[in-house]
Amino acid sequence: MSTPRSVVLERLAYTVTAPVLAAAPNLFADSPVNTVVQVAGVAGVGAWVLAARPQTTGAGRKILRWSPLVFAATVDIAARHTIGWGPWCLDGILAAGWAATGLLVMPFSRHTRRSHRPALAAPAPAPQLQLQPAPAPAAPVVQLEDGADALTRQVRRLWEARGMPGKTIIVTATPHEGMPNDLTLLLRASEAGRPISGLTDEAVAAAFGVDVSDVGIEDVARQYGREGGPGWKEVHVTPDLNERRRKTPTTREWWADRVASGPVPGSEFIKKVRDGERRVTHYIAQVPDEMGEPRINQHTLASALKTKYDEGRLFITVDGNQILVSLWDTSPLAQVFPATRELLTPDKDGRWVTGYLGNGQPARNRVYTDRGAAHGLFVAPSGGGKTQLMALHVAADALFGAVVMLATEAPDEKTAALGEHTARYGVGALYMIRLLRVLVALMEIRGEMLWDDGQVHEWDPARPGCPYRMLSAYLDEFLSAARNGDYGPEIMDLAELVSVKGRKYGVGLKVAGQSVYVQDGFTQLLCENLRENCIPVVLKVAPKKITDMFRALGIPAEYIPDPLPRSFSAAEAGRIERVMRGEPEPASDSNTGGAGWIVEGKEPSVLRTLFMDFKDGIDGFFPDTVATLTDYEIRELEARDLWFDWTEPPRPGEFGPEPDDKDNDGDGDWDNTPRKSGRKKTAARRDTVTSPRQALEAIRNLSNVLPSPRLGARRHLPPGPFTLPQPHEDHRCPSPTHPPNPPPATGYTAPSCHWRPASPRLTQP
């Protein structure tokens, strides 16, 4: 047997290295050879430590493999610490011993292999063909002899022919009625006591030649007289059912496939209700209690219902864990709901119908609350239906028997028609501030009026014996008046005061404007008071303002609604044909007037308000008699110099003390119009002009007192033969066909004539 080449090379290395180990420490003490040998020895010791661990196998073989390096380092260290070659030439003896030991051990050539190679001289054995014995045939699986029906025996033969997937055998095969290719299999493991582990949908689908989606595997519960558990499985093969479900699903199947798996996850369909009269379909579903509040993706749900979310046909109502999905044939917000006197008449709780919600429910507002008279807040941009909404509220208050007063910042045709059915109506910031002053005074007056029982009470419509009527004051374009340079600050202060205390004295403040933003002049206190004591209605807000608008009303972020569509009318079909013919698109119908939100709770609800046709006349919505203040209240207001024609220019001292003559450069004031305190505008009268300087001064003074174009503001008249007409005395109608107002008496009611003195105009004799 020849010696392997690796053994020869290793022995040669030991023989050559031994003299170097003996000579290097003695001839060159600082030689790099010594450092290399010692580092190799340290590595060998580290290998020993690793090999000696308990979890290491083959520790002895590994220790022998690294022993030459450790011994070489030992020899080198001993040679460096002996004098010369040592006694009896010890350095050479140690080096020779290291070489002899390495020749015998040879760790790298022998211990790096788990088995030795065969000798090179040994002839390779000639290959011989050996016949493998044929494998023993597998024991056939004994099928059940239980008198199964023909279908079960047929399916068993098919199952055996396909290799018995999952090593299972068929116990029963049950067909599905009306589905010739659908069946349910009851399987158990072919080996008793073993679980079914290799059965998959793919294996069953391949065995029957169907799609994987047509296979379902379920666990089998233990029943009386039959085992269950992991050794049993129930398999449903339903190709016919799935094909029908894809083409013509039932409502429950459609809900499970299209809705419960996406838009409303985990929901379970309950029932479907069709309201043919109202042309709406309701879907009722619920989610399990453990899932909490339903999570709804409205846009995905609209797609599943084959509509678009911005068409205004889909409305969702959540009640606990139940869900009501209402799908209208046409958007209910696109309909026009005519106002009727019956709808506007408040019931015993003071509630009346403002309009209809998107789900078809009537949206109701109220003329009073359990805290007293109700306030009002109407927000809408120009053309959003604010005047229509205000007319509905005025009619409801009048039908309730309340005294209604209306002030607007600018004249309007509809507002003027509405003013004919109110106790007082006027235009301008001056008129509005006088109305608010009367409201504040009435709170003081009513706070001292005795009821029938001789006591003073807070206003309550359910308590008998109230000596006064409820009063509703409407302020249209309130923010414009509140920004008035002369009267705005006081208008805002008085409005805040009425919003805080008016409800206790039967005084309701109804504010209408285009915004509720604090930065627009609407104070936070006024907004909170109105919001707390009324049911606000917001109409047709621009999409970018919706979040800020409802946040200002105190609506939580999760309940802020999505913007309303620009139109509720469905888009006309045939757009492709119009494009091919080069025809223009039909005009979009912006029929969103009166559509918006009513905020009765924490979540705004979409509604469309009732429609009051001013062209056909609105007299039928109001009572025949206009309610007014009592004689006592009028006398008290007159005593306070607050009950007069509010269209007059400012009266002397009405807005503060009059400036003295000395404030006018000693020449007197030719302008007899009273001025507000803190607002000085002096214009000295010059009877004669004797110098160019005096002429320029007169022109300058004249330019400062030109008549203001704003209706209801104070007017400064230039010198000349102009006079102001006096208001008609006692507010009697100048027409000879109408009798004068009756004298003040108990039970006084307003005359049938609704004439009011016109605003004073400049007249020249």
Image (cartoon, rainbow, N blue to C red):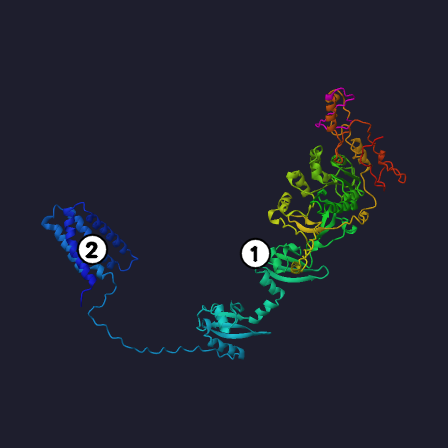
Circle 2 is placed at which residue position?
A: 68
On the rendered image, what quadrant is the C terminus found in?
Answer: top right
Secondary structure character of the magenta stretch overall: loop
Which secondary structure, mark 1? helix
Pick the residue in front: 590 or 487. 590
Which amino acid type is marked by label 2? Answer: Pro
Q: Distance between the residues labelled 2 and 1?
A: 72 Å
**Residue 686 position in % (x across, y down):** 77, 22
Pick the residue in front: 360 or 309. 309
**Residue 543 position in % (x across, y down):** 63, 48
Circle 1 is placed at which residue position?
A: 291
Graded by Cα atoms within 10 Å as few (under 14), some (14 to 19) or many (20 or more), the crowding at tag 1 reads few
**Residue 536 position in % (x across, y down):** 69, 45
Residue 225 visible: no
**Count of numbered tags:** 2
**Against 15, is 481 above or below?**
above
Residue at figure coordinates x 61%, y 59% from the top left: 303
From which residue to which does the magenta span run? 671-693
Q: In this view, does 314 lie to the left or right of 153?
A: right
Corner quadrant of residue 677: top right
In magenta stretch: residue 362: no
Choose mark 2 or mark 1, whichever is in front. 2
